[in-house]
Image: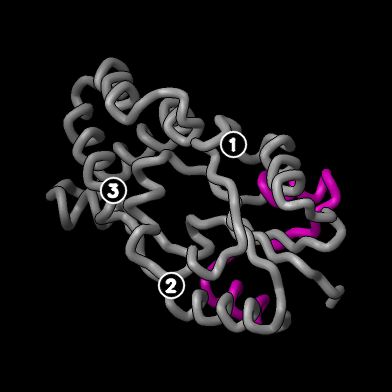
Amino acid sequence: MKKYKNLIFDVGDVLLSYRWKDMLMKDHGLSEEDAERIGQEMFCSPYWAILDLGTLSEEEVMDGYDLVYPEDGDHIRWFISHGELMQVPRPRVWEKVKELKDKGYKLYYLSNYSEGLFKKHTGNYPFLGYMDGGIVSYEIHITKPDHRIYERLLAKYNLDARDCLFFDDRQANTKAAEEIGIDSVTVKSEEFLLEELDEL
């Protein structure tokens, strides 16, 4: 494997897993069919992308969902308001990340997230403490796969793209990183990621 100096990690489905369907079913009492429908409404809506951009507040985004999906607005509002129930820890991944830091790699995060959900999902876990820096989309109002978010990370920390390896679960995001010269790995599962980190 090529030698890298810097490792860049997405957060969702890389450093953390999600249980959004279980959250709607087990914590909120919806049927699987209703949970699937509401998940589609939320995550495929432009409002979810706006949430990650940070150009509207959570309250404004929830108001937008109310207008588009009046029958499900209360469920969507509950989901966004209880985001602390969504994430699933990946301690084995964090252990590997810490080992890589101890071996001399510089570590960074680059993630699409709203401010509220990012703080709820990362506030109680140690992995951000291993990082040398990072950018979250809400901070700069740019989301992956826009080339500018990768360029902002490189510029902020004076990184050479050729020295970086990027991990993300979405192929569109890894493809965009590669287009500006950052080698990338599309993460297919937690086990896949652990194998990739072992190789490093």
Mark 3 and mark 1: Cα distance apart in space = 20 Å
Q: Position of residue 120 (x, y in %)?
A: 32, 52
Q: Which badge, 3 or 1, is on the more N-terminal residue?
A: 3
Q: Which mark is residue 90?
A: 2
Q: Label for residue 18? A: none
Vertical comparison of 104 with 78: above or below: below
- At horizontal 67% and vertical 76% (from top left) the residue drawn is 196
Instruction: Say the numbered circle drawn on residue 143.
Output: 1
Question: Is-magenta flag for residue 175?
Answer: yes
Q: How is the image coloured?
A: one colour
Mark 3 vs mark 2, CA separation in Å = 17 Å
On the rendered image, what quadrant is the C terminus found in? bottom right
Residue 123 in picture, x, y percent from top left = 35, 58
Q: Pick whichever of labels 2 and 1 is earlier in the sequence.
A: 2
Residue 147 placed where, x, y %?
A: 74, 37
For mark 3, what is the residue? 83
Q: Residue 35, percent across and down?
A: 26, 45
